[in-house]
Image (cartoon, rainbow, N blue to C red):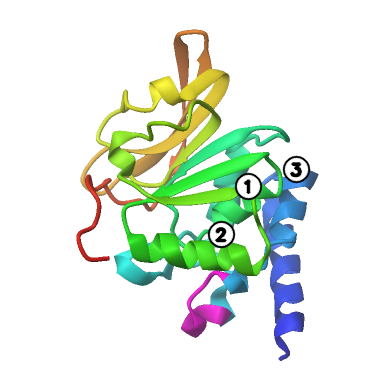
């Protein structure tokens, strides 16, 4: 089957699955459709680019299943003009999708290999409003001001205070929290003034966050 036809069929199947879940944001679905996921997966997994499977990346990292990734982005309620911080760059796919909706995305990862690869993926698609940085996500991100949305894709044992100063009033943080050694759940924190309201969302496949930069990768 030609690659173009496979992408079209994969995208059509994805849209049906998402709408069955009640995800109908035209801006988000258009952003996903405009961002070819096959450009972000390793070559040996091209056939699964539009599947709900978790796919391996370099450095022992992984890409979430596409359905799960879109569900996360839907929960962020992204809007034009926003600034977004992503902790856990991976392949750069979610940053690329967000960049088609918001004004600016800063994405960080402890693995230089992943940051470099993601930047190449973004450059290849001509996406210019994403800044990919090699940084320790467990320590937050100094020098970039505040953000309207923060998405974290490595789990904490409890709600971290490190990101509270990075979120504007009216902003939102979504991150995974370890409930046990084997169970992890996405949590959404919405800020109003100095108050944070918590909402538990759904279980997630993420691993505990690892502090400090990776030494060799």
Image quadrant containing the N terminus: bottom right
Residue named by callout 1: 98
- Real-space Cα distance between discs 2 and 1? 9 Å
Task: Decide: is 78 above or below 31.
Answer: above
Which residue is painted at 24% across and 35% down in the image?
157
Q: Within 10 angstroms of label 2, few (less than 14), some, or many (20 or more) residues? A: many
Residue placed most toward the observer, 124 or 57:
124
Is residue 178 visible in the rendered image? The answer is no
Residue pointed to by mark 2: 93
* Secondary structure at numbered mark 2: helix
- Which residue is depicted at the point 20% across and 60% down? 215
**Which stretch appears magenta?**
40-46
Residue 138 makes an appearance in the image: yes
Q: Identify the residue at image location x=48%, y=84%.
A: 44
Determine whether the residue tagged by mark 1 lies in a helix, strand or loop.
helix
Q: Nearer the viewer, mark 3 or mark 2?
A: 2
| Residue 120 picture location, percent across and down | 53, 68
x and y percent of residue 142 in the render? 38, 31
Which mark is first along the chain, 2 or 3? Answer: 3
Identify the element where label 3 is drawn: loop
Q: What number is the disc on residue 25?
A: 3
- Residue at the spot 29% in from the left edge and 39% down from the top edge: 138
Which label lies toward us, 1 or 3? 1
Tell me if 123 is positioned left or right of 81 in this view: left
In the rendered structure, does residue 117 fall within the stretch colored magenta?
no
In this orientation, which residue lies closer to the viewer: 156 or 84?
84
Q: Is residue 124 left or right of residue 153?
A: right
Q: For the residue carrying disc 1, how many other residues have a C-alpha within 10 Å: few (<14), some (14-19), or many (20+)?
A: many
Q: How many marks?
A: 3
Whole-Å distance between the Cαs marked 1 and 3? Answer: 13 Å
Q: CA distance from mark 3 to mark 2?
A: 18 Å
């Amino acid at each position: 089957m030609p690659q173009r036809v496979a992408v079209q069929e994969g995208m059509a199947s994805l849209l049906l699955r998402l709408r069955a879940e009640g995800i109908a944001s035209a801006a988000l679905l258009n952003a996903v459709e405009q961002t070819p996921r096959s450009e972000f997966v390793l070559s040996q997994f091209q056939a699964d680019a539009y599947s709900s499977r978790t796919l391996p990346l370099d450095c022992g990292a992984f890409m979430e299943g596409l359905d799960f990734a879109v569900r996360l982005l839907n929960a962020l309620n992204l809007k034009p003009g926003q600034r977004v911080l992503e902790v856990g760059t991976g392949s750069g796919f979610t940053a690329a999708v967000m960049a088609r909706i918001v004004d600016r995305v800063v994405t960080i990862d402890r693995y230089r290999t992943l940051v470099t690869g993601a930047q190449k993926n973004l450059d290849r698609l001509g996406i210019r409003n994403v800044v990919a940085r090699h940084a320790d996500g467990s320590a937050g991100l100094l020098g970039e001001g505040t953000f309207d949305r923060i998405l974290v894709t490595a789990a904490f044992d409890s709600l971290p205070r490190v990101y509270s100063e990075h979120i504007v009033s009216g902003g939102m943080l979504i991150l995974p929290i370890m409930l046990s050694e084997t169970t992890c759940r996405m949590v959404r924190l919405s800020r109003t003034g100095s108050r944070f309201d918590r909402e538990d969302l759904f279980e997630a496949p993420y691993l505990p966050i690892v502090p400090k930069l990776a030494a060799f990768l």
